[in-house]
Amino acid sequence: MRIALICPEVLLGMKKPQVMQGLHLVLPQWLEREVYQTFYSQCDGYKILDNGAAEKFSMPFKDLLKLAADYGVDELVLPDVMGDAAKTREAVDEAIDIVLTTSHKPFKLQAVVQGRTQEEVDFMIQYYQKSAFIDVIALPRLINYPLGAWARVNAMERMANNDLPQK
């Protein structure tokens, strides 16, 4: 198993931070700091550029897209609205439209499942699975709060077993 960390600044100074395993989860707001700019413009490995939503950060998606290109990321997290399936779906659709009209999709697109009910979570998973543009589906810890501690694990099992209710 490999784990992508949001790496604290103190670990960036290490020659080969073993904890990072060549997998980097990058917060866009941290790229304002020179130490992060330098590290992520030079590091090897698989880079995932987060959208910062869980940290209450937002920036126009076109700016996030530019950061993704500037830092040569491998994967970009599409916009999401914490806990809101409908607004997340709308934001994802708008972002995909921007990607299709402004770039040649040089990286994978990750979509985050949001929702307050099991039906919303299942709908989002199915919506993303049907998309020709979404490469990775993320299940955030936030869905555990309204649905219970095992919500993410249960969603992964249902995805793996193709056992989601058909709509």
Image (spheres, helix red, strand yellow):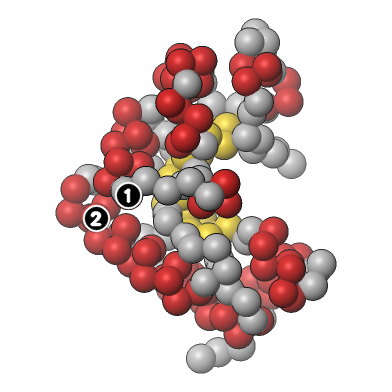
Which residue does the image show at 63% across and 61% down from the upper left? 139
The residue where tag 2 is placed is 98
Judged left or right of residue 33, residue 146 is right
Counting residues from the N terminus, which is met first, the one under dot 1 or under dot 2? 1
Mark in front: 1 vs 2: 1
Task: Tell me if residue 26 comes above or below residue 146 in the rendering.
Answer: above
Q: Are marks 1 and 2 in contact (CB under 8 Å)?
A: yes
* Crowding at mark 2 (Cα within 10 Å: few <14, some 14-19, many 20+): some
SS at mark 2 in the image: helix
* Crowding at mark 1 (Cα within 10 Å: few <14, some 14-19, many 20+): some
Task: Tell me if residue 139 comes above or below residue 68 in the rendering.
Answer: below
Which residue does the image show at 58% across and 74% down from the upper left? 115
- For this orientation, the residue located farthest to the front is 56
The residue where tag 1 is placed is 61
Q: x, y (%) of residue 28?
A: 45, 36
Q: x, y (%) of residue 15?
A: 65, 8
Q: As shown in the figure, which amino acid type bears the numbered disc 2? A: Ile
Q: Could you tell me how many numbered marks the image carries?
A: 2
Q: Is there any visible trace of residue 135 in the rendered image?
A: no
Which residue does the image show at 58% across and 58% down from the upper left? 138
Please tell me in which quadrant of the rendered image residue 91 appears: bottom left
SS at mark 1 in the image: helix
Task: Tell me if residue 3 comes above or below residue 34 in the rendering.
Answer: below
From mark 1 to mark 2, how far is it between C-alphas? 8 Å
